[in-house]
Image (cartoon, rainbow, N blue to C red):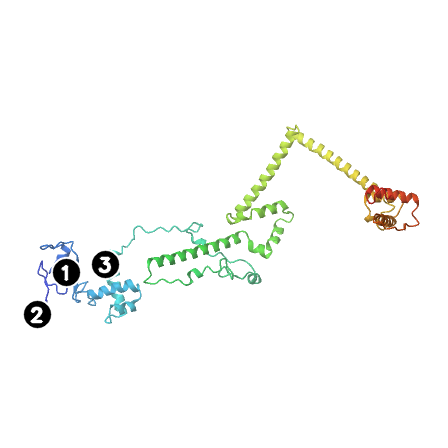
Amino acid sequence: MADLGKKYCVNCLADVTNLRLRCTDCPDIELCPECFSAGAEIGNHRRWHGYQQVDGGRFSLWGPEAEGGWTSREEQSLLDAIEQYGFGNWEDMAAHVGASRTPQEVMEHYVTMYIHGNLGKACIPDSIPNRVTDHTCPSGGPLSPSLTTPLPPLDISLAEQQQLGYMPLRDDYEIEYDQDAEKLISGLSVNYDDEDVEIEMKRAHVDMYVRKLRERQRRKNIARDYSLVPAFLGRDKKDKEKEKPGTKITKEEKEQRVRLRGLCQFMAHREFEDFFENMHKERLLRAKVRELQRYRRNGITRLEESAEYEAARHKREKRKENKSVVTSKRGKEGKDGEFAAIENLTGFELLSDREKVLCNSLNLSPARYLTVKTIIIKDHLQKRQGILAKSRLPSYLDKVLKKRILTFLTESGWISRDAS
């Protein structure tokens, strides 16, 4: 009666009660592991048919001589646990395998059988072929870790560090470029049940954060290379005075540096200085070429003749300059002496050039002339409006002066001819 519960291989009639492989396509076909691995075919059963492992729970994967007596079900639970919890979480793995196994037993069995055992030796070679080559380099390549490696701390005093908000041990500032960059990854976490889309989204966030870090470090490198921090603190002026005490930067050079400032983010400081120096040399060469072309237009073909030409041109320009200075002095003296008698009197600045000549020729003060002019124009307007009024000219105004002033005002358009 005890044999009724046993199962036998249909090929070799071996006892397969503990472990057998059942065909899912053919009914009542159960094989032992040896016949299954040999590809036994009986009746309509073929080796490529689907199969199902039937384990009674008492089969030992490593044979009866293996330590601990681990069954196949425990082995399968162990492999599921290592995939779910990861290597090293032995307590969670022991709970998953079953209460009969302690974390120490789980660790020893896995390390002994799967890492240092025959399976580990077959799956983990001593020398890994086709190992990935490390393309990172400290020379600033596209994968170089130097792009995000902090630079040595700045050599500044404690007061200057507080002024800048600079933390020398971290080479960071209290307010960095793109201050909120860390928000991209602050809430990220990798979960076991994440879908592929979620994992790719998290990778994209990490990539964006790395790009922002590289941009932040690139700006720090530019500031360090061009000594922007000492320039902000006012140190660069003192250093330049010490290095070149007698030289001064011209206005044109300052303006050109301002125009070329945008190139600093693409060029190192030494490259930018060389580029600027070459542009300065080019400007000097262009000026020299224009000078030689001017010599050629004036018939000079040798450099020896250019020296004589420049000396003669200098003398000629000096004579013209002296002549213009003498002429301007004479004109100024004549102009100043023309109205010397009345220029210091009250009302002189209110007269036009013709009125100044009139007052000077009549030997009449500007104030008296302005009084007579106001009375004559006022009487003229009253007569045009039909208002009869007696003339109130001053007593110092004789007939000759009155006639000369009336003629001048008529010619200047202040009064009409019939009124004069």
In the depicted view, which residue is nearer to us: 152 or 405? 405
In the rendered view, would you say 208 is above or below 251?
below
What numbered label is drawn on residue 311? none
* Amino acid type, callout 1: Arg
Q: Secondary structure at mark 1?
A: strand
Q: Residue furthest front?
A: 386
Q: Quadrant where the C terminus lies? A: top right
- Which one is in front, 201 or 390? 390
Residue 360 picture location, percent across and down: 87, 44
Q: Is residue 336 visible?
A: no
**Mark 1: few/some/many CA within 10 Å (<14, 14-19, 20+):** many
First in residue order: circle 1 vs circle 3: 1
User: Pointer 2: what residue?
Assistant: 2
Contact, mark 3 vs mark 2 (Cβ under 8 Å): no
- Mark whose residue sits in front, 1 or 3: 1
* Amino acid on which the number 2 mark rests in the picture: Ala
Q: Is residue 95 visible?
A: yes
Look at the picture and state if 400 lies above or below 28.
above
Give residue 85's quadrant in the image: bottom left
User: Please, what is the three-letter code of the amino acid marked with disc 3?
Assistant: Leu
Q: Is residue 396 left or right of residue 103?
A: right
Residue 13 image offset from top left, x and y in percent: 8, 61
The label number, if any, that marks residue 119 in the structure image:
3
**Residue 58, horizontal then vertical, whole percent:** 17, 67
Q: Secondary structure at mark 3?
A: helix
Q: Position of residue 419 (x, y in %)?
A: 86, 44
Query: Is residue 270 or residue 198 the one in the foreground?
Result: 198
Which labelled disc corresponds to residue 22?
1
